[in-house]
Amino acid sequence: MSQDRPLNNAELLSVLDWYRAAGVDMAVVDEPVDRFAQKPPAASTMPPRAAPAAPAAVPQAPLPLGGDPSEARQLAASAQSLEALRDVLERYDGCGLKFRATQLVFADGNPEAKIMLIGEAPGAEEDRQGKPFVGRSGQLLDRMLAAIGLDRTQVYIVNTVPWRPPGNRTPTPEEMELCLPFLNRQVELVAPQLVMTLGGPAMQTVFKTTNGIIKMRGKWQDVSIGTHTVPALPTLHPAYLLRNPPAKQQAWRDLLSFRARLDSLGLG
Ligand code: URA
């Protein structure tokens, strides 16, 4: 059957889903190439020429956003429990990240915990399992927690955005802005007594700064997240520590500082 009309949004999304199911999650050129319009190479008696160099991979552009931050704020504020907030997010279509992700990655750990960890964004394994920090960096995070006598029953773990950005890119400022009301509401509902942020983007979101993580790590600050004010400590992201093992020394200092603050508050 031939189709002359442009595809509608639902059809475009199902094409994207089909590509994703086939394992394609990165664009490699700026403009689409219509392979059907290309002529097959003419049969030739000449010796084959060297294959042209493959086009360089380019970062995937974010999907256009239809979202309205004030709508996100209203929806988030309407949730009176974590279950209600999860339900609101499941139905929220304002952030384009949702349409490239397999599922919502809401949170893990203990909703009654006094300690909250805030990461950046789900990766591939988190996207598959629907839980934050379950891939390689999550395994390192578990070891970091164990080193100061904690485990996932004593912490609540979230990300600044609850859907995996395609190709694991950093979420854009627009995507973060749309998701921030939901993070804020999650913090208000859990009301942790201590927060630790993991990596630069989470630190910048929570500390409302453009400073880099190397400058900020290890420095406690009282931060307001939504209406909740809480002491927070920024540390390095486990994925960064996997790439730069010598930086574990700095992360260890941060963890000891976190443990000392827990002890001084009689927590954990
Ligand atoms: N990195 C993050 O920041 N969050 C996750 O959930 C996994 C990896």
Image (tube, helix red, strand yellow):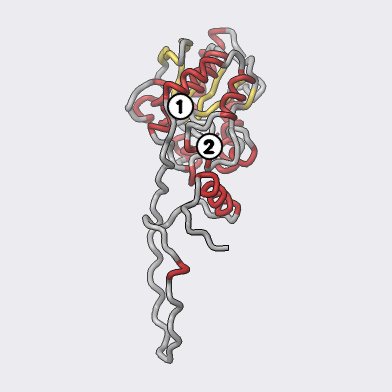
SS for dot 2: helix
Residue 62 point in image, percent of width and height = 42, 42
- Figure quadrant of the N terminus: bottom right
Q: Residue at x 55, y 26 (%)?
A: 158
Relative height, residue 18 to residue 37 (above, below): above
Residue 11 badge: none
Residue 143 appearing in the image: no
Quadrant of the frame with the C terminus: top right
Amino acid type, label 2:
Lys
Percent x, y for residue 215?
Answer: 34, 27
Q: Residues within 10 Å of mark 1 (few under 14, many from 20)?
A: many
Q: Is residue 167 above or below residue 52?
A: above
Q: Amino acid at mark 1?
A: Thr
Q: Would you place residue 47 above or below residue 162 in this image?
A: below
Residue 98's tag is 2
Where does label 1 land, which residue?
A: 235
Foreground residue, 243 or 174?
A: 174
Asked whether disc 2 touches disc 1, contact meaning CB atoms under 8 Å apart, the reply is no
As helix, strand or loop, the secondary structure at mark 1 comes to strand
Judge left or right: residue 140 versus residue 201: right
Q: Is residue 142 visible?
A: yes
Specify few, some or many for label 2: CA neighbours under 10 Å numbering under 14, 14-19, or 20 or more.
many
Percent across and percent down for residue 154 are 64, 19
Q: CA distance from mark 2 to mark 1?
A: 27 Å
Residue furthest bottom in the image: 45
Residue under the image location 43 percent in, 84 percent down: 42
Q: Quick one: 171 or 242, which is closer to the camera?
A: 171
Q: Nearer the viewer, residue 203 or 217?
A: 203
Q: Quadrant of residue 139?
A: top right
Q: Position of residue 159 (x, y in %)?
A: 52, 29
